[in-house]
Amino acid sequence: MIPAAFDYVRPATVDEAVAALAKAGEDAKVLAGGQSLIPVLRLRLAAPSVLVDLGAIPELRRIRADGDRIAIGAMAPHHEVLHDDLVREHVSLLARATETVADNQTRHRGTLGGSLAHADPAGDLGGVALALDAEFVIVGPSGTRTVPASEFFVDYFTTALSEDEILTEVRFPRYTGWGSHYEKFNRTAQSWSMVAIAAAVRVDGGTIAEARVGLTNMGTTPLRATGVEEALVGQPATAEAVRAAAERVTEGTAAPSDADAAADYREHLARVLTGRAVLAAAG
Ligand SMILES: Cc1cc2nc3c(=O)[nH]c(=O)nc-3n(C[C@H](O)[C@H](O)[C@H](O)COP(=O)(O)OP(=O)(O)OC[C@H]3O[C@@H](n4cnc5c(N)ncnc54)[C@H](O)[C@@H]3O)c2cc1C
């Protein structure tokens, strides 16, 4: 279908983009890679009067080292994130998860910021941001604020972003030397996750010293499996110990039942995939 008519602006700076959003009022929408927004417009599920395209603001595409963090511009396309040397060395879990997003074409257009702002519970990058304690840099009419991942994802397709705000950067602590793995279960290659588990662990002398585990599609938002993390720390990196810890993965989850899978099947998948992801991350 053809979208309803809209005005289109393509600002050159973040300040201009924020001003354009403020001027347009609540009827405006930010456009990033368009991989989720354009289908929504074509189906007429939304009909904004103005689209503010962030594609001409080069600083939003940068990936850089910033002290103890790796800062990734919201407009960095998935393809650039997953091939970036800094990301691969210090935030390898993000690279591994990004590699599973959609197909090559979509990864060239879709962006890290667009995925996180869209907040689809089946999206692959929210659980990673949550597990790794990422920070979200948000700019609006009253200035810049930083929101931890634990407060960014509010509900189904809902984040801490207001309509007049722009996500400009996502900052990840460095996990240099950690092992990581993203275990995604889907029905067909390149489709969305039925369930997925993001795991990063630091192993010291055969013992799991630190662990981070994020969950995709086990609730209305990405979730963090803190019970599993607690159970893993101090354990030997063996199949038996990891599988016992993985039993706690459904604590605090609310897996959906839909055409793809019933909730109890998703819970079963989560336990199995957590074991696999943590063992692979631990090497
Ligand atoms: C065929 C196909 C398969 C896919 N498969 C997967 C998959 O397996 N896993 C997965 O995780 N994703 C998948 N996706 C989604 C893909 O990752 C998109 O990149 C992502 O959902 C949206 O990113 P985008 O840059 O295209 O954002 P857009 O579509 O441009 O925007 C999405 C939403 O976020 C808002 N927004 C975007 N950027 C900002 C910003 N900087 N500040 C504030 N608001 C912003 C927009 O206003 C809009 O509401 C798939 C998409 C397609 C088309």
Image (tube, rainbow, N blue to C red):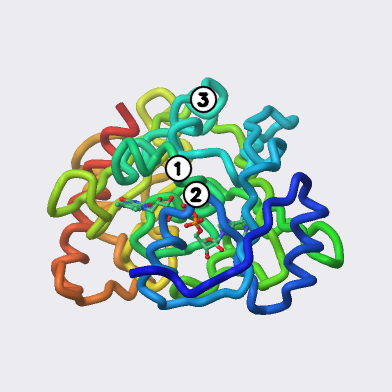
Instruction: Determine whether label 1 and label 3 are within 8 Å by CB.
Output: no
Mark 3 — residue?
Answer: 84
Q: Viewed as shown, does residue 108 lie left or right of 7?
A: left
Q: Which one is closest to the eye, mark 1 or mark 3?
A: 1
Mark 2 — residue?
Answer: 33
Of helix, strand and loop, which one carries label 1? helix
Q: For residue 75, what is the image quadrant? A: top right
Mark 1 — residue?
Answer: 109
**Amino acid type of disc 2?**
Gly
Q: Is residue 49 visible?
A: yes
Pointer 2 residue Cβ closer than 8 Å to ligand 1: yes
Q: Is residue 230 visible?
A: no
Between the C-alphas of marks 2 and 1, the distance is: 5 Å
Category of crowding for the residue at label 1, using alpha-carbon neighbours closer than 10 angstroms: few (below 14), some (14–19), many (at least 20): some
Instruction: Determine whether label 2 and label 1 are within 8 Å by CB.
Output: yes
User: What residue appears at the point 38 percent right and 63 percent down from the top-left corner?
Assistant: 39
Quarter of the render that holds ligand 1: bottom left
User: What residue appears at the point 41 percent right and 77 percent down from the top-left corner?
Assistant: 45
**Amino acid type of disc 1?**
Arg
Of helix, strand and loop, which one carries label 2? loop
- The residue closer to the viewer here, 98 or 39, is 39
Instruction: Determine whether label 2 and label 3 are within 8 Å by CB.
Output: no
The quadrant of the rendering that contains the C terminus is top left
Q: Viewed as shown, does residue 162 lie left or right of 175?
A: right
Q: Earlier in the sequence, mark 1 or mark 3?
A: 3
Residue 78's x, y, as percent? 45, 39
Q: Viewed as shown, does residue 15 lie left or right of 157?
A: right
